[in-house]
Amino acid sequence: MRLEGKVAVVTGSARGLGKAIVERLAKEGAKVVVTDVNEEGCISTANEIIANGGDALAVKCDVTSRESVEALASAIIAKYGKIDILVNNAGITKDSSLKKLTDAAWDAVINVNLKSVFLCTQIMSNYMVEQKWGRIISLSSLAGVAGNFGQTNYSASKAGIIGLTRTWAIELGKKNVTANAIAPGFMNTEMTKTIPEDIKKTLLAAIPVGRMGEPEEIAAAVVYLASDEAGFVNGVTLNINGGAYVN
Ligand SMILES: NC(=O)c1ccc[n+]([C@@H]2O[C@H](COP(=O)([O-])OP(=O)(O)OC[C@H]3O[C@@H](n4cnc5c(N)ncnc54)[C@H](O)[C@@H]3O)[C@@H](O)[C@H]2O)c1
């Protein structure tokens, strides 16, 4: 097991990529904190992990609220005494063409996808800096790397994650705390289930490996970036997209 004894928190882990990530981290020996606005989902994911022999804590948290994130950090410290790995995964979409994009849709996506990453990292990296070991892994997106029609707000939030990751690699690296991003392409989760079939066909046609990605393929990369073996990997954005965008 590669993460024995580590304490890992994954935001938005009631379902989707976050759920796959938290399950895999638990299998690698980490004590995991399942956190989401969806409290029922958190509890059921944590219970599944515990039923499979893992150690998990479920905490409801709205990552757009400083108070809520501070309460989350306090709950983790009370239960496990430290925070080693933070996976900034919570995210939403509110797609619209530039012409029709509302202020409300812009603010909602920037708050959940980008401000949350700042809040969670600012609060939780303190514990990592103090112990001189930490891993910050944030979910960007192919849309943040390459842009995407109808995703002004989403692509801005995901490109922002790449920028702050590079800054934190420089600021926190000297404390042995690394910051990296993962930019998934078209993944098989609830988030993409609502995409109309004709658009799905076009998206699939643009992926050289000819299929969507599976959540476990992102979880495997998170385990690597969270491990001791990845201690010299800092400030990168790992594209996992089946070759849909090559740069
Ligand atoms: N699915 C894809 O194809 C894809 C591709 C690239 C990037 N991503 C990114 O990966 C991450 C996970 O995506 P997913 O497909 O699993 O999405 P998902 O919608 O299945 O899960 C996202 C989770 O975040 C939670 N969440 C939303 N707002 C929150 C808040 N304010 N506080 C706490 N939790 C909140 C939701 O309740 C949900 O459980 C997101 O950041 C997404 O942008 C996904």
Image (cartoon, rainbow, N blue to C red):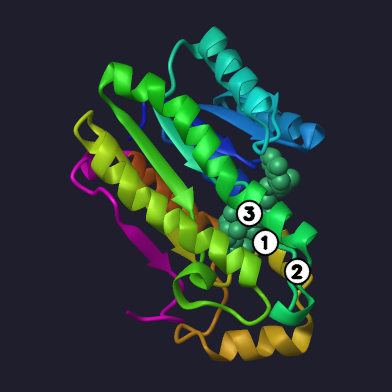
Q: Could you tell me residue 95's position as x and y percent?
A: 73, 70
Report the mark closest to the observer, 1 or 3.
Answer: 3
Q: Secondary structure at mark 3?
A: helix
Please state which amino acid type lies under the numbered disc 1: Thr
Horizontal arrangement in the rendering, residue 183 relative to residue 231 (left or right): right
Along the viewing direction, whichever of 161 and 51 lies nearer the viewer: 161
- Residue 109 counted in the magenta span: no
- Separation (CA) of disc 1 from disc 2: 7 Å
- From the image, state whether disc 3 or disc 2 is nearer to you: 3
Q: Give residue 131's quadrant in the image.
A: top left
Instruction: Indicate if the residue with disc 1 has its beta carbon within 8 Å of ligand 1.
Output: yes
**Vertical placement of residue 175 versus 155, above or below:** above
Asked if the residues shown at circle 1 and circle 3 are in contact, with their CB atoms under 8 angstroms apart, the answer is: no
Residue 6, picture quadrant: top left
Measuring 19% from the left and 33% from the top, which residue is drawn there? 174
Residue on which the image places disc 2: 193
Secondary structure at numbered mark 1: loop
Q: Quadrant of residue 36?
A: top right
Q: Which residues are magenta?
A: 227-247
Residue 189 badge: 1
Is 49 above or below relative to 178?
above
**Disc ID at residue 110:** 3
Disc 1 and disc 2 in contact, CB within 8 angstroms: yes
Mark 1 or mark 3: name the one nearer the start of the chain: 3
The percent position of residue 134, horizontal first and vertical second, equals: 33, 30
Query: Circle 1: is it few (<14), some (14-19), or many (20+) Cα within 10 Å?
Result: some
**How far apart are the two marked residues, 3 and 2, measured between alpha carbons?**
22 Å
Q: Residue at x 70, y 78 (%)?
A: 98
Quadrant containing the C terminus in the rendered view: bottom left
